[in-house]
Structure formats: C-alpha cells, structure tokens
Image: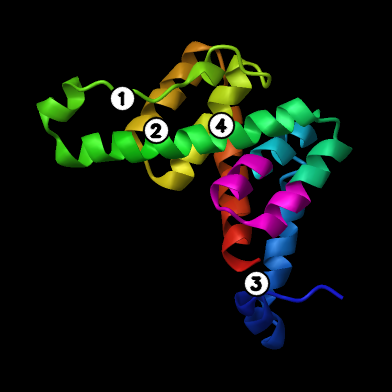
Amino acid sequence: MTTLSAPNQLLEDASSRYLRDMRVNLNSIFELENINKKEAALLGVAIAANGRNERTLSYFTEAAREHGATTEEIGDAVACASLLSANNVLYRFRHFTEKDTYEQLPARIKMNIMMNPVLGKEFFELVSLAVSAVNGCERCVKAHEASLLQLGTREERIFESIRVAAIVESVNKVF
C-alpha cells in the first residue's frame, strides 16, 4: 500500500472534492487537441523534475514510456528542466535588478543541448516555455513564446502546454 504525503493525507482524510478534481485534471492532459499523449507525458517529466518530485516524476516517466518516448527523449526533458532552472534564475535576476551592468555580462551557462535537442527544436522550446512559466521568469516566457511563434507554433498549442504544466505543478504540490 502506498503511503500518502502529508498534504495528500489531509485531503484524503477530509474526503476532499479537490482530489477528485485533481484526478480529472490529470487525466485531461492526455486528451488534448494540440498536445499528443507522448508530449503531455514529456512535459510532465520536465515539470516533475523541475519540482524535484520523485513520485510525479516516476508517474510521468512511466506514462512517457507507455506513449512511445525513448530514454533519450525522457533524458532531454529532464535536461531541459535543469538548464531552464539555471537560466530562469539568471534572467529573473537581470529582470529584477534592471541594471545595464548585469545585462552586459555574459551568462557563461553552457547550453549546447539547445542547439540540437533530441526532442526537436519546437518541442524543446515548448518544454522550455512551460518550465519558465512554472519558475516565474517573465523574460524567459516572452522569449520562448516569441521563438515558438516564429517557428510557426499555434497559440492553442502553446496554451495547452502551459495548461499541462499548471496541472502537473499542482500535482507536485500535493503528492
């Protein structure tokens, strides 16, 4: 029998309607119009890795495999989350301080994975956007959204990726 996290146990003890809502929300991310099941699962992997939630990461890793993701694609989703966490900290700092000095200094963060991602450029950008949205980096969100639009990604696809990220992040907070 799986032991529940403290927040989950509190919700379970209270017979929370929210748990039912969360299950519905979680299931809904695999039934989208613009994000396929494999992509939804890989977005889940990235957001779970970003949140350092082992249970959620395990769930989405298994789902990604079930929907045809390779080990390399799963690794790319985790790597993307890690890289974007570093970038989000740096660019939020630059944004918050609003100092030209910091804008002019090189980031010196290696980003070779962005040049030729296993996930493909468009989907890697979509994952980057989702992680940046979760991490609250306004500059990064705007940059990744602009890049996606330039690549021809439809706004509905962009929005669905953010919806997936929001749902996975809510699961990360409870489980």
Question: SS at mark 1?
Answer: loop
- Marks 1 and 4 close (CB-CB < 8 Å): no
Q: Earlier in the sequence, mark 1 or mark 2?
A: 2
Q: In the rendered image, which residue does mark 1 sit on?
A: 107
| Residue 53: in magenta span | yes
Identity, as a three-letter code, of the amino acid under mark 3: Tyr
Q: CA distance from mark 3 to mark 2?
A: 33 Å
Q: In the rendered image, which residue does mark 3 sit on?
A: 18
Query: Which quadrant holds the C terminus?
Result: bottom right
Residue 64 against residue 151 in the figure, above or below: below
Neighbourhood count class around disc 4 (C-alpha, 10 Å): few under 14, some 14–19, many 20 upward: many
Report x, y in % for residue 29: 71, 45
Identity, as a three-letter code, of the amino acid under mark 4: Cys
> Taking the image as drawn, is residue 53 in sight?
yes
Report x, y in % for residue 35: 70, 32
For residue 80, the mark is: 4
Q: Earlier in the sequence, mark 3 or mark 2?
A: 3
For residue 87, the mark is: 2
Q: Is residue 2 left or right of residue 152?
A: right
- Marks 3 and 2 close (CB-CB < 8 Å): no
Q: Residue at x 73, y 69 (%)?
A: 20
Q: Is residue 57 left or right of residue 95?
A: right
Query: Which quadrant holds the N terminus?
Result: bottom right
17 or 10: nearer the viewer:
10
Q: Earlier in the sequence, mark 3 or mark 1?
A: 3
Q: Residue at x 74, y 47 (%)?
A: 60
| Residue 25: in magenta span | no
- Marks 1 and 2 close (CB-CB < 8 Å): yes
Q: In front: mark 1 or mark 2?
A: 1
Which residues make up the magenta segment?
45-60
Answer with the quarter of the image where residue 85 lies.
top left
Identity, as a three-letter code, of the amino acid under mark 1: Ala
